[in-house]
Image: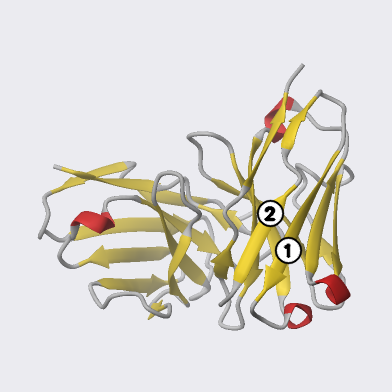
Amino acid sequence: EVQLVESGGGLVQPGGSLRLSCAASGFTFSSYDMHWVRQATGKGLEWVSAIGTAGDPYYPGSVKGRFTISRENAKNSLYLQMNSLRAGDTAVYYCARWGYDSAFDYWGQGTLVTVSS
Amino acid sequence: EIVMTQSPATLSVSPGERATLSCRASQSVSSNLAWYQQKPGQAPRLLIYGASTRATGIPARFSGSGSGTEFTLTISSLQSEDFAVYYCQQYNNWPPLTFGQGTKVEIK
């Protein structure tokens, strides 16, 4: 059974940093592109970052230069280092697998990040 | 950036009735479009990819159609468990991957 379990969320002050983790199981982690998607309370879904099987990262303009995605295949783990956090980064952050057929075929349960003083 | 626009924002439907949700892309995304269902407090769930292919385990009452810039998700006979928010997402031209703002399907 495919499982994605996020951790590392919490309350952080504006300008602060946080590192999210996603533990994957039930599939060959190294063979899949992985993504982070976030959702502010009561709002829609926003793509945050992606990492290919070769470790190539992708970001939207809203987080480029502040967030860094990485993976550790030996530990079946995905990470998101978030720096210079802003109030607008407050959201539930989901880890998601990009399936071979394309689209996000598995999602974690999410971890809440709150940026506030 | 490709902008995805969903309509309507809210759809009120009675159980057993048909629901039709629309998604429009600001430029062609070919058939590289997915639909997701999200219930309160849960992660999204993949329903449709490639504009019209149902994901594993998705009931046949869900169907997707369209290509280019106009897409439709149809739920043929709404069941109680189908009341949720639905999002479309394009993956033809990225980064960035982009989602529509969602359509909430509520009980009439």
Secondary structure of residue under mark 2: strand
Residue at (84% x, 63% y) in the render: A57
Secondary structure of residue under mark 1: strand
Which amino acid lies under the numbered mark 1 shown in the image of this protein?
Answer: Ala
Asked whether, in this view, residue A1 is left or right of residue A35, the answer is: left
**Residue A88 numbered mark, or none:** none
**Do callouts 1 and 2 point to residues on the same chain?**
yes
Asked whether, in this view, residue A45 is left or right of residue B53, the answer is: right
Asked whether, in this view, residue B99 is left or right of residue B66, the answer is: right
Which residue was labeled with disc 2? A6
Which amino acid lies under the numbered mark 2 shown in the image of this protein?
Answer: Glu
The location of residue A29, given as percent across then percent down, is 74, 77
The location of residue A64, given as percent across then percent down, is 84, 47
Q: Choose between A68 and B28: the one closer to the eye.
A: A68
Q: Choose between B76 and B93: the one closer to the eye.
A: B76
The location of residue A113, given as percent across then percent down, is 69, 36
Which residue was labeled with disc 1? A23
Residue at (79% x, 80% y) in the render: A30
Chain to which the residue tagged by mark 1 belongs = A
- Mark 1 → mark 2, Cα distance in angstroms: 6 Å
* Placement of A76 over or under A20, stated as above or below: below
* Placement of B46 over or under A6, stated as above or below: below
